[in-house]
Image: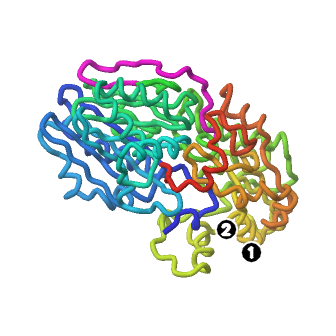
Amino acid sequence: MNPRIESDKPREECGVMAVRSADGTVNDVAGLTQLGLVALQHRGEESCGIAAASDEDFRIEKDMGLVSEVFDEARIDKLRFPGATVAIGHTRYSTMGSSLRFNAQPLTVRSNKGLIALAHNGNFTNARVMRDAMMAEGAVFQTTNDSEVMINLVARYAHLDLPDATARVMGELEGGFAVVLMDKHRIVGLRDRNGVRPLVIGEMDEGSVVFASEPGALNVIGARFVRDVAPGELVVADGHGLQSRQVLEPNPTPCAFEWIYFARGDGTLDGASVHDSRVRMGERLWQEAPADADVVVGVPESGLAAAIGFARASGIPYDLGLYKSPYAGRTFINPTQRLRERKVRLKLAATDVVRGKRVVLVDDSIVRGTTSGRIVGMLREAGAREVHFRVSSPPIKFPCYYGIDTAARQDLAAASLTIEQIRERIGADSLAFISEEGLQRAIGLARTCTACFDGHYPAGHPGDAAEKDDLQHT
């Protein structure tokens, strides 16, 4: 099943999690990693895996499916072995053609450093060049994803220990990435110089260290948020605690879509609250594109906070005009295109709140416009007199090369259509997007990555060849 067929949303491609027990005080590092992955399930629903290690043993379990499907009690028990003090986990979306078990992570490699495991969120934009050079020297690759390039590069620096080898590789790879690696004794966490993909550090009562893509994964296991891994920073958690080094000169431009859509609303990333940012996006939308209406309705889930902000700023009442079924997660059997198209009705239903009303409909993004048009149609069928569509991201005009599964540029509605043409396509009475300036002010950071809106790629553009690249990104 290709997840992109089912939803007209950008896909964040991965979540990573890691736990290192301080002196063996946590006796279930794999179980804690599993719980953290459940909290990160929204970042990847296709495959997942966990690696765990002790001084004497190193085990990995991974497969296709949700965390709850892959890790039943019998399978997680295989990772609960005596002395295990280190574990990393991964949950993944894939790009087209890579929905295969061998691409599931963590990835492992055997080297003179012993076994090493890696879990990666993002995209190495120069992975193809690096891979071709390594293959010309006789290297063999087992997967079709770019993460394997990094773990093989780390292993090849035989004269360096794991942190030093990883620091060397950080300077050779380009793109947007957050990575956790492990051997039998330690965890290494890092972010690219731009901090495009998130990674946070937590601590448990007994001094055990946790790395995760989002703070929500820390909360669920009872860990305290310590701080974000800084852009370009490498952090080592071992028997001596935490050691940090600034490997790359930082140029912070984290992905704006973390605050627009990807991240859970209960978290704070790089000092900016996700929920508060989304509310401010809605307030800004009212300032930039007011509408004469009777009710404000948000598209669940990430459109709700922006809808609250729009209602708060405008004085127009907010109400739940769309009901989201809690049981319509993934559909495993989609035998016809007609059923795929109707899946939105399984997930969402319009309520009587909109009957006879002029509705402001607030959503976080429009990629192709297909789902947006169906939702507008639902509201009209439910009796809405007018539907004014407001979007808390600017128009998406360019593909992402840093780990978001957006469509090819020719499939992006805003790349080839005017806002008025998009309005006609989705059937709304009016349509407006937040401005880039308004978005930046709402998030509250000095800079974020807005390449999918303006085509300015802070971590480097891989060029036209990337559109034909057969490496899969995570």
Q: Determine contact: label 1, label 2, CB under 8 Å.
A: yes
Q: Vertically, is 162 above or below 290?
A: above
Residue under pointer 1: 381
Q: Nearer the viewer, residue 226 or 87?
A: 87
| Marking on residue 135 | none
Q: Position of residue 422 (x, y in %)?
A: 81, 61
Q: Is residue 312 visible to the viewer in this orientation of the structure?
A: no
Q: Quadrant of residue 174?
A: top right
Give the class, few, some or many, for how many residues have Cα within 10 Å of label 2's Cα (few <14, many ≥20): many
Q: Vertically, is 413 above or below 107?
A: below
Q: Is residue 58 visible to the viewer in this orientation of the structure?
A: yes
Q: Vertically, is 442 above or below 70?
A: above
Q: Position of residue 3 (x, y in %)?
A: 53, 63
Q: CA distance from mark 1 to mark 2?
A: 8 Å
Residue drawn at point x = 83 percent, y = 59 percent: 417
Q: Quadrant of residue 151?
A: top left
Q: Position of residue 203 (x, y in %)?
A: 34, 27
The secondary structure type at the circle numbered 1 is helix
Q: Nearer the viewer, residue 92 or 330?
A: 92
Magenta span? 235-256
| Marking on residue 350 | 2
Q: Nearer the viewer, residue 281 or 445?
A: 445
Residue type of the residue flagged with mark 2: Ala
In reply to whether residue 246 is colored magenta, the answer given is yes
Relative placement, left or right, of 3 versus 205 is right
Give the class, few, some or many, for how many residues have Cα within 10 Å of label 1's Cα (few <14, many ≥20): few
N-term-proximal mark, 1 vs 2: 2
Q: Position of residue 352 (x, y in %)?
A: 70, 68
Residue drawn at point x = 72 percent, y = 53 percent: 362
The secondary structure type at the circle numbered 2 is strand
